[in-house]
Image (spheres, helix red, strand yellow):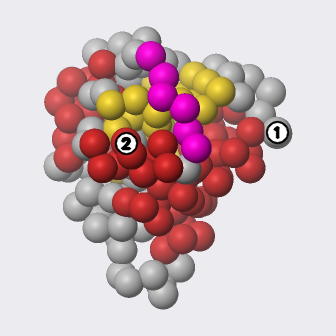
Amino acid sequence: MELLVQMVDITTLRVDAIVNAANEKLAPGGGVCGAIHAKAGPELAAACAAIGGCPTGEARVTPGFRLPARHVIHAVGPIWRGGGAGEPELLASAYRSSLHLAEEHGLRSVAFPAISTGIFGYPYQAATRIAVQTVQAAAASRRHLERVVFACFTADVFQAYRDEGVLTGAGR
């Protein structure tokens, strides 16, 4: 599986699925969640409401509606509480759950934002390490998934992925 990092607006990527850094209610929020909902259109909020929520550490999937991506995987990462409330395992679980859904749906390409690092306050260096290690560990068991893109909105987060050894990829 190819792992790439890009400085890009995740809502513009033509991949099988983009991952939304969602909240437990799967409601439109701020940051990347708000941007995804805005670009996908009101149908996304209706589809999320029909699901009825998602626990922290898990993920759910919907169509992409007006996005270039065919699907949106809504992953609920933890709110940072200092590191002693199970945050690392919950964050890793959100990535694993997303990858499981991608495999279950036969998806070949998925783009992740830096889950939990925005308004949820997870330190981006630690979150990046967990993201990369979790995706790498899951790579061997994925039959369909060929490419994972870590879509970064800021230069410091982009550099954190580069520091973890993720190659820079061209936009697609």
- Total number of numbered discs in the rendering: 2
Q: Nearer the viewer, residue 2 or 18?
A: 2
Between 153 and 89, the residue placed more toward the observer is 153
Identify the residue at horizontal 17%, vertical 49% (top origin).
Answer: 30
Q: Residues within 10 Å of mark 1 (few under 14, many from 20)?
A: few
- The three-letter amino acid code for the residue at tag 1 is Ala
Q: Where residue 10 appears, x then y in whole percent?
A: 33, 29
* The residue stretch that appears in magenta: 165-170
Q: Position of residue 18 (x, y in %)?
A: 43, 30
- In the rendering, which numbered label is found on residue 140? 1
| Residue 155, image x, y percentages | 28, 42
In the picture, measured across the screen, residue 46 lies left or right of residue 77, that is left
Q: Decide whether residue 110 is among the magenta residues.
A: no
SS label for mark 1: loop
- In the foreground, 157 or 24: 157
Residue name at image x 49 percent, y 74 percent: 87
First-in-chain label (1 vs 2)? 1
In front of the other: 77 or 1 = 1
Using the numbered discs, state the Cα–Cα distance from disc 1 to disc 2 in whole angstroms.
25 Å
The disc at residue 158 is 2
- Left/right placement of residue 93 relative to residue 117 reads right
Residue 56 in sight from this viewpoint: no
Q: Give the structural element (helix, strand or loop) at label 2.
A: helix
